[in-house]
Amino acid sequence: MTTERKKLNEVDSGVVKNLQKVVNFMEEKKYYPVKRYLEIQRSAILDMEGFWSKEARDIPWFKEWDKVLEWEPPFAKWFVGAKLNACYTCVDIHMISWRKNKVAIYWEGEDGSTKSYSYAQLYREVNKFASIMKNLGVREGDIVVLYLPMIPELPISMLATARIGATHTVVFSGFSSQALADRINDTGAKYLVTADFGMRRGKHYPLKTIVDEALKQTPTVQKVIFIKRSEEEIELMDGRDFTYQELMEKAEKYVEPVAVESTHPLYILYTSGTTGKPKGIIHSTGGYLVYNYVTYKWVFDISDESIYWCTADVGWVTGHSSIVYAPLLHGATILVYEGAPDYPQPDRWWELIERYGVTIFYTSPTAIRMFMRYGEEWIKKHDLSSLKILGSVGEPINPEVWEWYYQVIGGERCPIVDTWWQTETGGIMISPAPGLELVPLKPGSATLPLPGIDAEVVDDTGKPVPPGKKGYLVIRKPWPSMLMGIYKDPERYREVYWSKFEGLYYTGDYAIKDEEGYFWILGRADEVLKVAGHRMGTAEIESVVVEVPFVAEAAVIGIPDPIKGENIVIFAILKEGYREDGKLKDEIVKALRKQIGPIATPKSIHFVEKLPKTRSGKIMRRVLKAIVKGETIGDISTLEDEASVEEIKTIFHEFKEIFGKDDSNKSEN
Ligand code: PRX
């Protein structure tokens, strides 16, 4: 054989060997995953009702449905005629299996205090809490507002509320008294459950004071339960206020779970939109639970062995689905942590993962970016080999952050599930699904819609855009955990989600679908900000700013931030006779913290004479954004007065000083 021939053979045999390896690998891993995955998706969408009714049988019902779906666009009713109870499906069901003595909740506080509850203990607590709520007068259909820090009593009170057929509204405990009062007043709730304090960064924050302030403005509230965590006396109002501990002493051990309709509202959760006050998103019981049961099996491959840790606060939808309902439906063990991620030092989380043997870890890109800054040495100190799956949620994850998460936290072993969803969707919609079929991952892409989810990217007219082109993310068919509406405002529901495109659910997000059908979520297409994953409307912030007595007008924009994803920048026009004296900005910050909470603290405030507006008076936030980012402004033919742009350009040095030249401050939107 000539040398050339030999070389060719060598190459050939190398290629053949490699091919064989790939074939074996595919065989072993069942590796035509995208194709198979798309096939499952397609069949689910083609026979949607058959598909969901089959999946729905995995959770316990008291009565089966007469109809899988009643679709009167844009209102969907899933599993019509069926009856169930959310608390029964998450807790009671485990009493009749070996899981009874398994740990349901591990809780740890920032100060190192710990608690744990087996499913049997959880069952006892939930029953007792349900009994005290019943004794206080809570009935089926009532709304109970829960304003609680991340303590076990939060999931317990959610489950207890559901047990007696009431509806819960959890208000994030970082919200201010005004934000709490607004939510209570919108629901008209008669009952509130809260605590004396929460824990963060070595300090106790006084929930009691905030609640007292809020209650001055909430005439509907008749009964308040305080969970007392400290020995300190708290002042209680006779006949209205009760302490949890005292009531629990007299509680009954068992309360019959109320069989509610599948469409009965399990909860109302407030979220920000483009206009006005936050809206109350209503979620059903049956459809919501079915969807979350199924998708956690697919996305997180959740099982009896899972020690599941979602770092979100229960005050957000992620906490509702990912901390409470989905893992407990599966009888998994959850870790609940109260405190800051990096307190007292930046390895707090990694130490917890090691000590509890966490197998599934679900967090936000903001948190990952923060830990990247702290450096790998904090992570290397701990054995994270228990981890099997890593999740990301709440905002787009940049590819370099994805890679770091994959390598440093996941040890190149754990698939990352980049899960796209919303308060409104109730459950994960677009995500890799290692529990079903792991498709090849692409850092920065949430990959493919889950089976049964008919997602598309469309242009302004609602027509699908070609692969690789940016458009609006829409969903074409109803899904079981879809919001049932906006509380007390069906018209707003129709208007916000179903009027931009005829017959399509509008998500408010920009996305790109690539050649292989993978979705890349680019961020919000509307006036909604995502600051450290927290959702806030520019209009919501502006309305607080213009209420400050010396402010005439205000415009709020979101500016890319290397850690938080986005940050708040405010432009304001002062009323006649006022001049910045170094205190006015503080007043605005104070107002925002008081009306919304610390999450609304802006990165910077700039006083200007004019704001760029269209001739019809609409503020051109796009122009403000471009100037702050030092980018070209684009078309300003509709601008009313060019002097406004010139003025803001003259204060460009202020932005440069604040935002520096950090490249990560550049983004698509
Ligand atoms: O813009 C999208 C972003 O978060 C929005 C929904 O926010 P919220 O209702 O607070 O729920 C967050 C947690 C479920 C979406 O419209 N978002 C959520 N997940 C992702 C995301 N953006 C990109 N990638 C994600 N994985």
Image (spheres, rainbow, N blue to C red):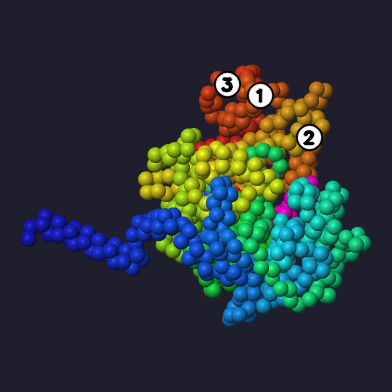
x then y, percent, for residue 154? 71, 63
Q: Are marks 3 and 2 in contact (CB under 8 Å)?
A: no
Q: Residue at x 80, y 22 (%)?
A: 576
Write down the region rendered in magenta.
170-178
Earlier-in-chain disc, 1 versus 3: 1
Q: Residue at x 79, y 46 (%)?
A: 178
Report the side of 29 relative to 335 (left or right): left
The image's mark for residue 617 is: 1
Earlier-in-chain disc, 2 versus 1: 2
- In the rendered image of this protein, does residue 300 appear above or below residue 547? below
| Three-letter code, disc 3 | Thr
The Cα atoms of the two marked residues, 3 and 2, are separated by 28 Å
The residue nearer to you, when weighing 306 against 240, is 240
Dot 3, how many residues are within 10 Å of its Cα: few (below 14), some (14-19), or many (20+)? few
x then y, percent, for residue 436? 44, 63
Dot 1, how many residues are within 10 Å of its Cα: few (below 14), some (14-19), or many (20+)? few
x then y, percent, for residue 388? 49, 66
Residue linked to disc 2: 547
Viewer-nearest of discs 2 and 1: 1
Q: Are marks 2 and 1 in contact (CB under 8 Å)?
A: no
Q: Outermost residue, left direction?
A: 1
Q: Are marks 1 and 3 in contact (CB under 8 Å)?
A: no
